[in-house]
Image (cartoon, helix red, strand yellow):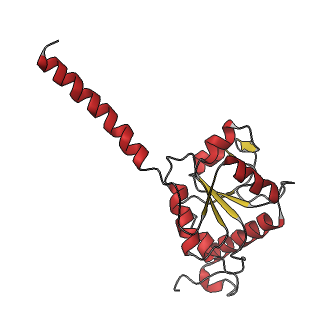
């Protein structure tokens, strides 16, 4: 093998290795103020009735999501969590995205902690790990965004869904007409 060919192959190998290395470096392992959990810890919280928040986009959510999850697209709806005034900030919430390579759950977890939520769990491994372990999911369009008919809904989940319905109602009516103790003013 000529030196030029050797150099070309070496350069090509480096170009293939560097992107994989940088992706690995970008995984966010933990968020200050939140508890990073694996799938088995997430299942334990699910069975205890914690509220799961799916921060993926609408299309991904509709393809499938963890059963009873509340859908708050990070780019569109997640700030509703800040606007809720009546919700106890100590309720257990589990925030997830697709996988450990999905930054949205890390950003959402950081925001929830910054907004004063005290019992936040960062499910870094996300939906694909949950699905691979054959844990409870909803596939397709079989669950409404804020459906309250699922038997697995706990009191915490119902409180979260009710509070989010109030925020959505306030948004549709304009915040000026919304009841003060329910929804934060955007001016704050």
Residue 111 is situated, as x and y percent measured from the top left of the image, at: 53, 69
Residue 37 is situated, as x and y percent measured from the top left of the image, at: 64, 54
Does the rendering let one see residue 18?
Answer: yes
Give the vertical position of 140 relative to 110 (above or below): above
Seen from the viewer's position, the closer of residues 31 and 115 is 31
Q: Residue at x 53, y 67 (%)?
A: 32
Residue 124 is situated, as x and y percent measured from the top left of the image, at: 58, 52
User: Residue at the top extreme?
Assistant: 1
Give the vertical position of 188 relative to 23 (above or below): below
Question: In the picture provided, is 65 more to the left or to the right than 4?
Answer: right
Q: Residue at x 49, y 46 (%)?
A: 101
Quadrant, the N terminus: top left
Q: Residue at x 59, y 45 (%)?
A: 60
Seen from the viewer's position, the closer of residues 170 and 81 is 81
Question: In the picture provided, is 40 more to the left or to the right than 58?
Answer: right
Give the vertical position of 40 relative to 132 (above or below): below
Give the vertical position of 93 relative to 19 (above or below): below
Please tell me how many numbered marks the rendered image carries.
0
């Amino acid at each position: 093998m000529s030196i030029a060919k050797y150099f070309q192959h070496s350069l090509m190998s480096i170009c293939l290795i560097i992107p994989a290395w940088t992706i690995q470096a970008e995984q966010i392992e933990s968020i200050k103020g939140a508890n990073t959990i694996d799938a088995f810890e997430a299942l334990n919280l699910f069975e205890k009735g914690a509220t799961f928040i799916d921060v993926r986009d609408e299309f991904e959510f509709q393809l499938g999501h963890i059963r009873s999850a509340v859908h708050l697209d990070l780019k569109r709806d997640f700030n509703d969590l800040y606007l809720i005034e009546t919700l106890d900030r100590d309720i257990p919430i589990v925030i997830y995205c697709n996988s450990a390579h999905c930054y949205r759950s890390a950003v959402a977890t950081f925001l929830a902690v910054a907004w004063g939520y005290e019992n936040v769990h960062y499910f870094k491994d996300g939906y694909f790990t949950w699905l691979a372990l054959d844990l409870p999911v909803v596939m397709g369009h079989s669950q409404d965004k804020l459906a309250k008919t699922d038997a697995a809904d706990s009191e915490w989940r119902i409180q979260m869904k009710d509070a989010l319905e109030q925020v959505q109602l306030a948004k549709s009516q304009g915040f000026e007409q919304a009841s003060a103790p329910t929804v934060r003013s955007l001016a704050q």
